[in-house]
């Protein structure tokens, strides 16, 4: 039984391609599930696409923001609405890009861990990405390691994470970052509070488009590293 939160900002194309793929996987392998699409103030047809899916499948629910409030805010709102004991968050472009069998592996790992992260950077991972993203990711991970040398999580910003419901509620109520830096804050908060964090390898071939702004978002992430270091101190 899982609730899957899909934050979406101007993601009409990714939703149109990926939600049907994910629906088929969940129906065949999980049975009891819900998908919560959070339209975070999109300016394109994201809301219309999401509503069309919801009309066809009662297990798809929609949260709509009139204004863009950020990825972190969107995921927290989805966590608060989730009904099942296992709560996943997944970026809208992932179902067609990853081996979805990892969902069952993550669900199994949640039996003995509080948080499970599908990691792009541990042994066993198989990732194909655009060069500029590889470079930006490597720089960001070095910054995170410098700020939190004992964090022991290689992929804080993975777009596929799973949480036990109680842990998800604690995160939803206590984390503050509203945008991309929410992912890092979530992992730092988890470590600071003694939650178990497990990483498992991810197979991923980058596809589709992304709403990542290559100028603004890296700056926001850098600021997020600094804020988390100030707010949470050493781990």
Image: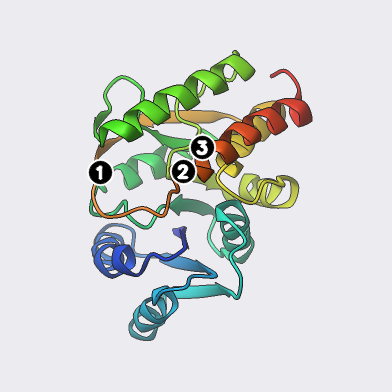
Q: Mark 2 — residue?
A: 161
Element at label 3: helix
In the structure shown, which secondary structural element does the residue marked by tag 1 occupy?
A: loop
Front one among 48 and 19: 48
Q: Which mark is residue 206?
A: 1
Looking at the image, residue 135 lies above or below residue 46: above
Q: Quadrant of residue 220?
A: top right
Question: Considering the image in quadrants, where does the N terminus appear?
Answer: bottom left
**In this orientation, which residue lies closer to the viewer: 114 or 151?**
151
- Please name which of the two marks, 3 or 1, marks the residue nearer to the observer: 3
Give yes or no for contact between labels 3 and 1 (Cβ–Cβ under 8 Å): no
Measured as percent of width and height from the top left, residue 20 is found at: 26, 68
Mark 1 Cα-neighbour bin, 10 Å: few <14, some 14–19, many ≥20: some
**Residue 228: quarter of image:** top right
Q: Which quadrant of the rendered structure holds the C terminus?
A: top right
Looking at the image, which residue sits at the far front?
A: 215
- Taking the spot 55% from the left edge, 74% from the top edge, the residue there is 64
Of marks 1 and 2, which one's residue comes earlier in the chain? Answer: 2
Residue 213 visible in the displayed image: yes
């Amino acid at each position: 039984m899982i609730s899957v939160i899909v934050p979406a900002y101007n993601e009409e194309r990714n939703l149109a391609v990926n939600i049907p793929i994910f629906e088929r996987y969940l129906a065949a392998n999980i049975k009891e599930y819900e998908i919560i699409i959070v339209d975070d103030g999109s300016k394109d047809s994201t809301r219309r696409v999401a509503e069309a899916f919801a009309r066809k499948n009662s297990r798809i629910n929609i949260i709509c923001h009139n204004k863009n409030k950020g990825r972190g805010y969107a995921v927290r709102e989805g966590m608060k609405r989730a009904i099942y004991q296992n709560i996943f968050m997944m970026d809208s472009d992932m179902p067609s890009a990853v081996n979805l069998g990892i969902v069952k592996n993550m669900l199994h790992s949640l039996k003995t861990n509080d948080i499970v992260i599908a990691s792009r950077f541990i042994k066993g991972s198989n990732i194909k990405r655009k060069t500029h993203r590889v470079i930006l990711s490597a720089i960001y991970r070095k910054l995170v390691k410098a700020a939190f040398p004992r964090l022991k999580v290689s992929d804080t910003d993975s777009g596929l994470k799973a949480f036990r419901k109680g842990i998800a509620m604690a995160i939803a109520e206590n984390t503050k970052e509203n945008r991309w830096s929410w992912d890092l804050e979530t992992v730092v908060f988890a470590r600071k509070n003694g939650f178990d964090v497990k990483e498992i390898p991810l197979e991923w071939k980058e596809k589709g488009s992304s709403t990542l702004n290559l100028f603004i978002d890296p700056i926001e992430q850098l600021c997020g590293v600094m804020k988390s270091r100030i707010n949470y101190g050493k781990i």
